[in-house]
Amino acid sequence: MRRHNLSVALRSIHQEGGASRARLTGVLGLNRSTVGDLVGGLVDAGLVVESRLDPVLTGRAGRPSLVVRPLEEAASVLAVHLDVHWLRVARVGLGGRVLDRRTEQLPVPLTPDHAVARTAALAGQLLEVPQQRDAVVGVGVAVPGTVRTGAGVVGLAPNLGWSEVDLGTRVSEVVTALTDRPVPVAVANDADLGVLAEHLRGAARGVADVVYLCGTWGLGGGILTGGHPLTGSHGYGGEVGHIGVDPEGRPCHCGSRGCWEAEALAAAWAHPLGLDPDGVDLAAQVLDRLERGGVAARRTRDRASRSFARGLASVVNLVDPQLVLLGAGLWRELWPSLAGDVAPWLGRLLLPALRDHVQVRLAGLGQDSTLLGAAELAFEALLDDPLAARPAAAATG
Amino acid sequence: MRRHNLSVALRSIHQEGGASRARLTGVLGLNRSTVGDLVGGLVDAGLVVESRLDPVLTGRAGRPSLVVRPLEEAASVLAVHLDVHWLRVARVGLGGRVLDRRTEQLPVPLTPDHAVARTAALAGQLLEVPQQRDAVVGVGVAVPGTVRTGAGVVGLAPNLGWSEVDLGTRVSEVVTALTDRPVPVAVANDADLGVLAEHLRGAARGVADVVYLCGTWGLGGGILTGGHPLTGSHGYGGEVGHIGVDPEGRPCHCGSRGCWEAEALAAAWAHPLGLDPDGVDLAAQVLDRLERGGVAARRTRDRASRSFARGLASVVNLVDPQLVLLGAGLWRELWPSLAGDVAPWLGRLLLPALRDHVQVRLAGLGQDSTLLGAAELAFEALLDDPLAARPAAAATG
């Protein structure tokens, strides 16, 4: 019971970046002295600190309220976002703030060996100081592919050309070498983590039915329905990229033809415009070509916008979300210029009852939705059992 | 607390058609005397009866076990399945058995007035005896359209040509006239109720990720993901019929073109084969024409099977279910003959990782999935609060 209450209290402090004792009393539904005891337990564990808010700053009269804040430098995680062309590694503190980060471009094709070695190198830069190493309570890794829940095995990451890669174990080995002690590593699909972070901290706070889309070379989807993640029976749920949008369309790497991601993502723009689909600034190049105009640009714009609308309409008609969020990737960058091209098609293709309800918006956390979702995954063990999973520094201190 | 425990006990007895005291003790996690008291409460409420199983019949030696059975004639519901061409009304007893039923063909087009009047007429036939009227604790209505959750308002039933019909209130009026007291009426989408019943009592027992498809003129979908119904933010979730399968395809009544239901359901078969799409034995006529062969039959078979596979592959790629169930409707009847035509396309269109996992099967409850789902909806008030919602006969007896 105490473990459960500590978990609820720390989760609340983490998600809100801090919470007053009054707020915690409300969340926990317990009396003030029990809440005081729980906060004391979290303070002793080196996870939070209590301070009085300055009443001048808060604008409220009377006795200043005690606020419990996460000790972000004392309890942190490593968040890893392995994208097709970019590796992002961040140190994220309890409370959800990015404390430090490293980003580098990846070669194509990318081998698992190289990805793990570069993850280790960037993690090493972020954990140079012993206190930083001792503070790490977990590692979360986001990959553009399907992951077998629990096992940390990437089943299939078509845009990396990977299948059956035991990434969890391999990342665990290199992190253990850095920290000199075992640190739990969890791996999950990038879009599933993106929608999780947007729901907790971004544009989908309080929204129960959300479709989150991301990716440039492939199209990942993370879906919440009724507040629950749509993971599917083998962790492949939400793989929207392979909805068929045109039976006569382009061949897709999955073996099928006319899949949404083949018709509306990088290849669908780059090939007819003569651009390199693996170019790192593809969106900027596409926008530049569209601005310069011409027949090929107009045709490509029409076809890809229509295809994007077709896939989106199928997903929205099936899922009935309140909100579609465009996360890190090509369409996030194209949307401000192309929303007007997509909207009329959506109007035609969506069920009449859904047309006026669904909103398409940019993700609230920008490029960081996935990275912050990976951090949430990494914090899960600590939030579930704060005393057992507290950082090494606190446990020995 | 007692209300909650009575609810859990009655739900278990209802779902399993009866339960031993030992089973109830396990489900409730309470001691035997408390369980005895709860069973006594349900017996006094006129909802269940206790009897000893004959040890010769059960094949087990020793003292015969006490079994608690639902009093199905004393606590029952009216289940109404309003299909495009058929009206089915049944009296379903606590425990989930159909006690009696009436079915009749409906005219096209069907007005709400006529549907309500015929529902009242069939319900009247099923409730001729006063005891039957007194036993009714609820009415559940399944419709081939979207329903605003809670309100009982059919938002849009395109294949009936209905929009914004307050069916709940209207059915409530005619049922009150029959029973001389208010009886709660709930309305829901036919496919959502179908998957509910299959999950509780049919082919999807214990399966958390299920896609249930039904319908002849339109294609309804009921989806469970992680055990939760995918209802969407306005109750339109699972509307699989308007996934796009062919951008150059047939116009759909929804205003779009090439929707799954336009390409693979009644119209897609009837028009090229020169059959009446509203014919009540359409499946038999289609199968007869396919057996007789010929160019039109072969072409239609190829095109509709491929279109069925396309829509199904998009749904399966998105939802990752363990099981796809074909409920009441055209494809349930065509499947035994056409599974071999659809399977190769599915093999091509499904993500490789899903091909070997997903099973397509006929629904376990046959034509009755939806009707039994409507019954479950109608029992909900009683199962939630057995003493407050017990039948009029028991309450006054």
Image: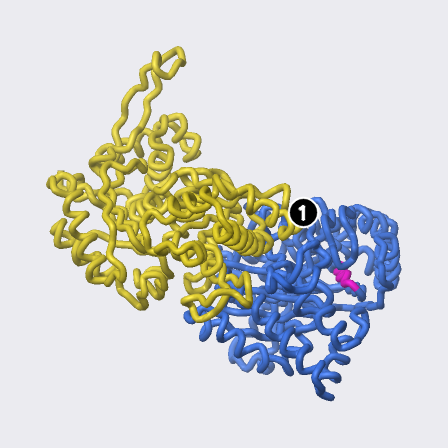
Chain colours: A blue, B yellow
Q: Nearest the camera: B370 or A24? A: B370
Mark 1 lies on residue: B353
Q: Estimate the x, y position of residue B158 in percent, counting from the top left.
A: 36, 64
Furthest toward the bottom, the residue is A292
Q: Is residue A79 magenta?
A: yes
Horizontal side of residue A271 vs B103, given as left or right = right
Q: Estimate the x, y position of residue B193 in percent, counting from the top left.
A: 38, 49
Subunit bearing disc 1: B
Residue range (magenta) = A78-84
Q: Is residue A283 magenta?
A: no
Give the residue type that dot 1 points to: Ala
Q: Residue at 71% of width from left, 87% of height from top?
A: A293
**SS for dot 1:** helix
Horizontal side of residue B222 vs A98, given as left or right = left
Furthest toward the front, the residue is B294
Q: Nearest the camera: A321 or B348? A: B348
Q: Nearest the camera: B147 or B43? A: B147
Horizontal side of residue A71 vs B283, given as left or right = right
Asked whether residue B265 is in view, the answer is yes
Q: Name the chief secondary structure element in magenta.
A: strand
Q: Estimate the x, y position of residue A301 in percent, counting from the top left.
A: 66, 79
Q: Residue at 64% of width from left, 83% of height from top?
A: A337
Q: Nearest the camera: B201 or A202? A: B201
Horizontal side of residue A290 vs A111, given as left or right = left
- Hey, which quadrant is residue A92 in on the image? bottom right
On screen, residue A298 above or below A211: below
